[in-house]
Amino acid sequence: MIRRVIQIEEDKCNGCGACAKACHEGAIGMVNGKAKLMRDDYCDGLGDCLPACPMDAIHFIEREAEAYDEAAVLKNKEEKAKAERSRLRQWPVQIKLLPVHAPFYEGANLLIAADCTAYAYAKFHDEFLKNRVVLVGCPKLDSTDYAVKLAEIIRQNAVQSITVVRMEVPCCGGLEMAAKRALEASGKRLPWQVITVGTDGTIRE
């Protein structure tokens, strides 16, 4: 069908992203530092993005385009909102503040994470925190032996698995060792893994 949709002049676009933020339907995305109309059926033709552009790079045109799909736009908004929500399942999160026994430990997969990992790794919530109970600490800043408390948490609760997420820096080795000693001291044999995050925010193999 022929209808009114936006057109973005790439050579004028300065990559500020203001239009993408102004588009309530999610029709505009940023690709290689430039704004781009991602889907015709998300563009309602009302042009909330036009006044947001400081470079006058967006205009209306009449052309062949898919009809505006309000149902698809609403579904996309719901999926984005769901993806952006916090995956945190309990409070507190700091190892030194957590109780030894609590209902949220029962049947839980424990995530023992260094403080810095949540800041260094962009997908921390979705890839690490989702469906796990998190215990956070920094062996360099906390003057305590995590192993003792962690051992009691593992021993006294029906924990299913342990994942340690640490930074590649040497001080994080203390967190990994504390978790390892805690598991040994608990007398249990559980699935166990260690994931190391680099200071550049990537996972180290």
Image: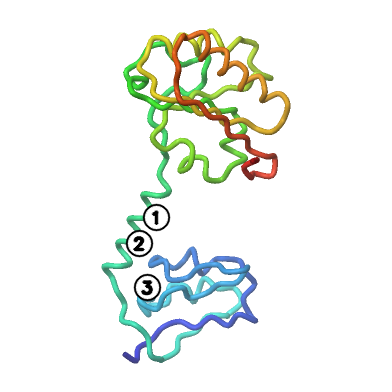
Q: Residues within 10 Å of mark 1 (few under 14, many from 20)?
A: few
Q: Residues within 10 Å of mark 2 (few under 14, many from 20)?
A: some
Q: Which residue is mark 3?
A: 42
Question: Between 43 and 185, which is closer to the camera in this rendering?
Answer: 185
Q: Determine the CA span between mark 2 and mark 3.
A: 9 Å
| Badge number at residue 76 | 2
Report which quarter residue 107 is drawn in: top left
Q: Disc 1, disc 2: CB below 8 Å?
A: yes
- The picture places residue 96, in percent across and down from the top left corner, at 53, 14
Q: Is residue 32 left or right of residue 62?
A: right
- The disc labelled 3 sits on which kind of residue? Tyr
Tell me the element at label 3.
helix
- The picture places residue 120, in percent across and down from the top left corner, at 62, 40
Question: Between 11 and 174, which is closer to the camera in this rendering?
Answer: 174
- The disc labelled 2 sits on which kind of residue? Asn
The residue that appears at 42% across and 38% down in the rendered structure is 130
Q: How many marks?
A: 3
Q: Is residue 187 left or right of residue 70?
A: right
Q: Is residue 44 above or below residue 63?
A: above
Between discs 1 and 3, the one toward the N terminus: 3
Q: Which residue is mark 1?
A: 80
